[in-house]
Image (tube, rainbow, N blue to C red):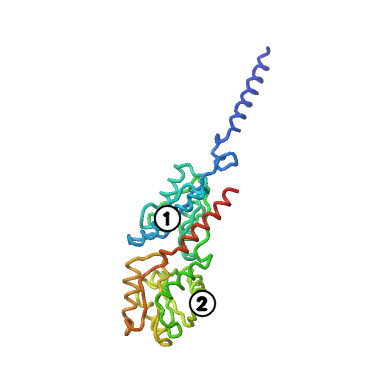
Amino acid sequence: MHKKYIFYIIAASFLIITGMAACKPGNSKDNKNSGNEKRKTGLLLVNHGSRSATWRSALLDLEKNISPQILNGKKIEGIKTAFMEYNEPSIATQMKAFDDEGFTDVIVTPIFLTVSPHSFEDIPTILGQKEDPKSMEMLKIEKIARYTPKAKVHITPLLDFTEVLEKNVLRRMKELSENPAEEGVVLIGYGDETYEKEWEALFRKVGKYLQDNAGIDHLEYAWCGHIAHYSSGPTTNAINKILRAKKKAIVIPVLVAFDENFQLKIIGGGVEKVKDYKQRVMYKPDAILPDANVERWAIDITNSYADKVMQ
């Protein structure tokens, strides 16, 4: 046989063999999320992080409380919690773990109240979904690791997407209230300078809910975080505004979890600066968590996104 024809036969055989190999499932990295591969979906609960062990415990308790029901549904095969800053395990650490365990998809649920640079810019930047220069610089300064996972990431909406926050504040207000007609409410949030208008809109929305469902017609709000420069002064000022119109003020911390620095030192310190505060101010240094409605929200939104992943 002519050498030229022998070469053609060998070349054709090689192309057929390599073509068949390329078609095998899992042979290419590009196939990791193809329809031929079984999907394995995880849930990552992301929170801000805190130096307070009490604060961190509340977020770990959230994971513990919702895990049985979510895992029993068989849609989610693993649940982890990540702290965005201050603490390990970080987002990068947990996403690497999901990759190492062979997860193809991870639903990321931020336990944040409303939009902020953390939820809108930092988390997507950490996960390699955005390249925001300001966020990247902040992450570098704070020594927060970035990691682009192999798994496909699905980020869910925040808590203010539902009425969970309004119901939470209403319940806590009623626990302190004695006579709504004589009372006003002060909401104290962490706040954010970049999204201050959005935070204000959220608090007005909560105030309207309290008015409609509890007859509260006087509402003030203040910040205890960046906007207030961690000062107790804004808390005191907001309470005094209420007391000029009402006999008593109910103070509600609109914070995800309990942190001694915020609920006791900053907000509590602001309460104590009010004249006759023991008689005129009703304050319990609590937080949004624990809350069965928040747990229900986390379960429902996870299942909703898991259904989309499986489609």
Total label count? 2
Separation of disc 2 and disc 1 at Cα? Answer: 31 Å
Residue sitting farthest toward the top: 1
248 left or right of 155?
left
The residue wearing badge 2 is 213
> Looking at the image, is 250 positioned above or below residue 97?
below
Question: Which tag, 2 or 1, sits closer to the chain's start?
Answer: 1
256 left or right of 268?
right
Check the picture and name the quadrant holding the N terminus.
top right
Choose top left, top right, bottom left or bottom right for residue 45.
bottom left
Q: Are marks 2 and 1 in contact (CB under 8 Å)?
A: no
Task: Name which residue type carries label 2.
Answer: Asn
Task: Name which residue type carries label 1.
Answer: Glu
The residue wearing badge 1 is 63
| Eye-nearest disc, 2 or 1 | 2
Task: Answer few, some or many: residues within 10 Å of disc 2's Cα (few below 14, many 20 plus, some between 14 and 19).
Answer: few
Which residue occupies 32% across, 85% down?
Answer: 276
Which residue occupies 41% across, 60% down?
Answer: 48
Which residue occupies 49% across, 77% down?
Answer: 210
- Considering the numbered disc 1 on the image, is that residue within a helix, a strand or a loop? helix
Task: Answer few, some or many: residues within 10 Å of disc 1's Cα (few below 14, many 20 plus, some between 14 and 19).
Answer: some
The residue nearer to you, when weighing 197 against 80, is: 80
> Looking at the image, is 220 positioned above or below residue 77?
below
Q: Position of residue 63 (x, y in %)?
A: 42, 55
Q: Position of residue 306 (x, y in %)?
A: 54, 51
Which mark, residue 8? none
Choose top left, top right, bottom left or bottom right for residue 83.
bottom left
The residue nearer to you, when weighing 156 against 286, is: 286
> Looking at the image, is 217 positioned above or below residue 310?
below
Q: Position of residue 158 (x, y in %)?
A: 50, 62
- Considering the numbered disc 2 on the image, is that residue within a helix, a strand or a loop? helix
